[in-house]
Image (cartoon, rainbow, N blue to C red):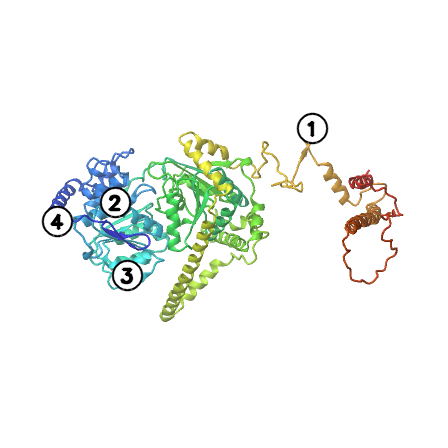
């Protein structure tokens, strides 16, 4: 493409070769001749359809993906320009998928398309190639205004579509831009009027249509609506209808969706004219790719964090996407796992981030080939094409089967393979049955207990030392409970069945957060809607203006906060120039993984952590057992590291028994304890008397030891003074000091004082204090004999 806009809105230019007048004329004549040939081919090759079903002949391609008879399986066999072919070859796009071979010929012929295809089937190229070819055949330029608009539900998907458009159309001289929320509207207004193709989110596109004076869409040739079901799920029904009112009626419209439910058909009736319905996977046995291995695990809520950490630790060299329900959970998991270091590098992606940070994380995750885990919400569940994702882990149950399909669709894209794991609570087992009814095959597995260990002590220590992370844990707890409370399917999502105390403890919290009130949210929402309904038009306008102003202030504050956070991250990354022990270890592991690539390491790794379950209703106990071949690590004080404190002893016949120390402790706590014929009270009195006697003896020993130490010091000083007098030195002058009262004052040059022995219990002190300790221990041991 001659010019365009990158993810930050900055113009980028591709250098063009300077041609002479004759060269430009020859190129123009060659383009006109090529356009004429293409139009003839399109009229001859792309006009067939089934009149009864309304479906194209391209749908009759076989399961091997050989494509329809007229168009062929290769992109170069389509009636498209040589520039587009060169762009496809440069991007390594050679063969077409089923949705591409079915939709592209009809779209080239100018027909409206209503396409249904599961995620990862290549819908993006199915509409980008017709867009580029439409503008090329009409010799569109930036002076002609907006020629094509592509509407996407999320910023990430819009950014990715723009990248693919830049690659496919790199040989064309058309201008393209990406406009999404989160950027300066004024900066976009300066350049939006010169764009021939716009990739936009619904809200920002409508805002430009309403507020940008130089933005003209009256000459629009083509409208593309991608992921239509997700757009409607986000609540953009009214926004889409308002966008359609700004666009000309004489246009071509392409609508693509993963599912064609009722609301999508209603939008299609408003936007399309006699569309060609293309549903390539409608009759397939499974709604997900065959190369995707799908599993689920049933576990209590309090075991999710431990299982997730252990999973990432055992799959440290894999590229993993972890889905959770709320943004607060993403923030907590990222901050906690960043410090606990499960193995792979961790990233976060959620709707609360600024656009710059989201695009940065998006690009970093795409560039990483292995050893990375991305914590995200459903913001990354639709349409986004992350390359080489090995695992998709859903920590929380999705709200519907469609959401599940879109989540797992981030892996096993095109012809690649992938795996997914779903964590289900015992109260959510019905969701697995719903998946089976929806033609989604999942099998039950469980984690090996000797591979799952608890990180609750580490989390508790982390929260005790950081108030910010403790606050995130409290918010994550409340947001998850609220999300379960607001789920529609109450037969699956039951907030009363959740163990709140155990869940709070698994997050490292001491107790259930105070003020974490997730009750009454539905009533509050109803009251808000009722209040809004009773307002006058003027009051609603004032509320709208006030909300808009608050939104600007909030965006400004958020930008400052994000900039400060990015500065802190850059400082933290810059300060760590020298690699630590853990980072060096990860590099060695990554190097070993690359060297051993192609061996059966992935299968071995999966078997090392996961195991199949014959009957999902009778899962093994969730408490992890200690590994028999691991050495017990001790602290300096003798206590065991990562010890649960719950030891069970077994006799020879296999029955449980308690240890001798546990029996003694139980007897001491009992009122019937009778050590020497008396009761517990008399025994305690005897112990108190013995301890008092020992205290007096120990005090006398301590005083004697200190006194002897002082005497040795004085003798040494007198010896040094005598040596100085023999050498002829004057003794140091001393200021007179008041006499001290002493019970007994020894002469200055007398022999060392003898220590008097205590009267209560004579003890012979030796030079070795270890003898005293042995005597004390022997006397203490005699008490319990």
The image position of residue 420, as x and y in percent, is: 43, 39
Q: Disc 2 to disc 1, how far (Cα)?
A: 75 Å
Residue picked out by circle 4: 20
Horizontally, residue 730 falls left or right of residue 491, namely: right
Residue ID at (24%, 45%): 129
The image position of residue 749, as x and y in percent, is: 85, 51
Confirm whether residue 619 shows in the render.
no
The image position of residue 126, as x and y in percent, is: 26, 44
Q: Which quadrant would residue 387 be assigned to in this image?
A: top left
* Residue 168 tag number: 2
SS of the residue under disc 4: loop
Nearer the viewer's eye, disc 1 or disc 4?
Answer: 4
Confirm whether residue 647 shows in the render.
yes
Count of residue discs:
4
Asked whether 464 or 456 is in front, the reply is: 464
Nearer the viewer's eye, disc 4 or disc 2?
Answer: 4
């Amino acid at each position: 493409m001659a010019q365009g806009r990158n993810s930050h809105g900055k113009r980028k230019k591709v250098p063009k070769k300077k041609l002479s007048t004759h060269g430009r004329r020859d190129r123009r004549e060659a383009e006109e001749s090529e356009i004429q040939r293409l139009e003839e081919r399109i009229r001859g090759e792309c006009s067939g359809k089934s009149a009864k079903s309304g479906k194209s002949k391209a749908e009759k391609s076989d399961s091997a993906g050989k494509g329809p008879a007229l168009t062929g399986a290769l992109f170069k066999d389509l009636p498209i320009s040589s520039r587009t072919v060169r762009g496809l070859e440069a991007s390594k796009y050679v063969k077409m998928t089923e949705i591409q071979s079915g939709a592209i010929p009809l779209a080239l012929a100018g027909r409206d398309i209503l396409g249904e295809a599961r995620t990862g089937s290549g819908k993006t190229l199915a509409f980008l190639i017709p867009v580029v070819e439409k503008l090329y055949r009409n010799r569109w330029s930036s002076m002609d205004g907006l020629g094509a608009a592509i509407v996407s539900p999320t910023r990430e998907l819009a950014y990715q579509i723009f990248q693919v458009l830049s690659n496919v159309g790199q040989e064309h001289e058309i201008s393209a831009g990406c406009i999404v929320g989160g950027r300066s509207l004024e900066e976009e207004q300066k350049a939006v009027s010169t764009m021939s193709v716009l990739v936009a989110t619904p809200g920002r596109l409508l805002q430009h249509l309403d507020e940008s004076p130089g933005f003209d869409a009256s000459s629009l040739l083509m409208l593309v609506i991608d992921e239509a079901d997700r757009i409607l799920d986000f609540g953009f029904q009214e926004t889409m209808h308002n966008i359609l009112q700004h666009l000309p009626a004489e246009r071509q419209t392409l609508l693509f969706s993963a599912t064609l439910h009722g609301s999508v058909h209603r939008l299609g009736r408003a936007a399309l004219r006699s569309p060609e319905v293309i549903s390539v996977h409608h009759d397939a046995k499974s709604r997900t790719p065959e190369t995707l291995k799908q599993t689920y695990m049933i576990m209590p809520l309090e075991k999710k964090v431990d299982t997730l950490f252990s999973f990432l630790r055992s799959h440290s060299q894999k590229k993993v996407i972890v889905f959770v329900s709320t943004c607060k959970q993403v923030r907590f998991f990222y901050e906690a796992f960043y410090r606990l270091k499960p193995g792979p590098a961790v990233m976060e992606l959620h709707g609360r981030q600024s656009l710059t940070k989201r695009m940065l994380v998006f690009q970093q995750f795409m560039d990483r080939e292995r050893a990375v885990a991305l914590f995200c919400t459903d913001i990354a569940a639709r349409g986004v094409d992350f390359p080489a994702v090995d695992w998709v882990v859903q920590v929380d149950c999705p709200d519907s089967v469609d959401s599940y399909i879109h989540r797992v669709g981030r892996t096993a894209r095109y012809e690649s393979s992938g795996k997914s794991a779903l964590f289900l609570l015992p109260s959510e087992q019905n969701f697995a049955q719903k998946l089976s009814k929806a033609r989604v095959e999942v099998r039950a597995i469980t984690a090996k207990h000797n591979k799952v260990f608890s990180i609750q002590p580490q989390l508790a220590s982390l929260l005790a030392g950081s108030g910010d992370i403790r606050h995130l844990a409290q918010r994550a707890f409340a947001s998850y409970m609220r999300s379960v409370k607001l789920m529609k399917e109450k037969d699956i999502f039951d907030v009363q069945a959740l163990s709140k105390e155990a869940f709070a403890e698994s997050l490292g919290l001491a107790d259930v957060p105070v003020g974490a009130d997730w009750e009454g949210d539905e009533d509050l929402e109803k009251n808000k809607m009722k209040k809004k309904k009773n307002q006058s038009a003027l009051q609603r306008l004032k509320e709208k203006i006030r909300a808009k102003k608050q939104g600007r202030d909030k965006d400004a504050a958020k930008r400052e906060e994000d900039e400060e956070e990015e500065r802190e991250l850059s400082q933290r990354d810059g300060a760590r120039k020298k690699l630590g022990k853990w980072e060096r270890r990860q590099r060695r592991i990554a190097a070993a993984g690359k060297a051993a690539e192609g061996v059966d390491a992935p299968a071995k790794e999966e078997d090392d952590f996961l195991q199949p379950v014959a009957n999902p209703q009778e899962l093994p106990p969730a408490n992890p057992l200690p590994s028999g071949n691991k050495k017990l690590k001790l602290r300096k004080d003798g206590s065991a590291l990562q010890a649960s404190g719950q030891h069970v002893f077994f006799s020879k016949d296999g029955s449980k028994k308690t240890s001798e120390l546990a029996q003694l402790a139980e007897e001491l706590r009992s009122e019937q304890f009778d050590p020497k014929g008396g009761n517990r009270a008399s025994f305690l009195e005897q112990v108190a008397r013995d301890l008092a006697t020992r205290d007096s003896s120990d005090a006398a020993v301590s005083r004697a030891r200190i006194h002897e130490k002082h005497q040795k010091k004085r003798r040494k000083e007198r010896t040094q003074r005598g040596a100085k007098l023999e050498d002829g030195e004057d003794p140091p002058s001393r200021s007179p000091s008041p006499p001290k009262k002493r019970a007994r004052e020894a002469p200055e040059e007398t022999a060392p004082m003898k220590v008097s022995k205590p009267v209560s219990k004579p003890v012979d002190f030796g030079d070795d204090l270890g003898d005293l300790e042995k005597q004390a221990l022997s006397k203490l041991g005699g008490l319990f004999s």
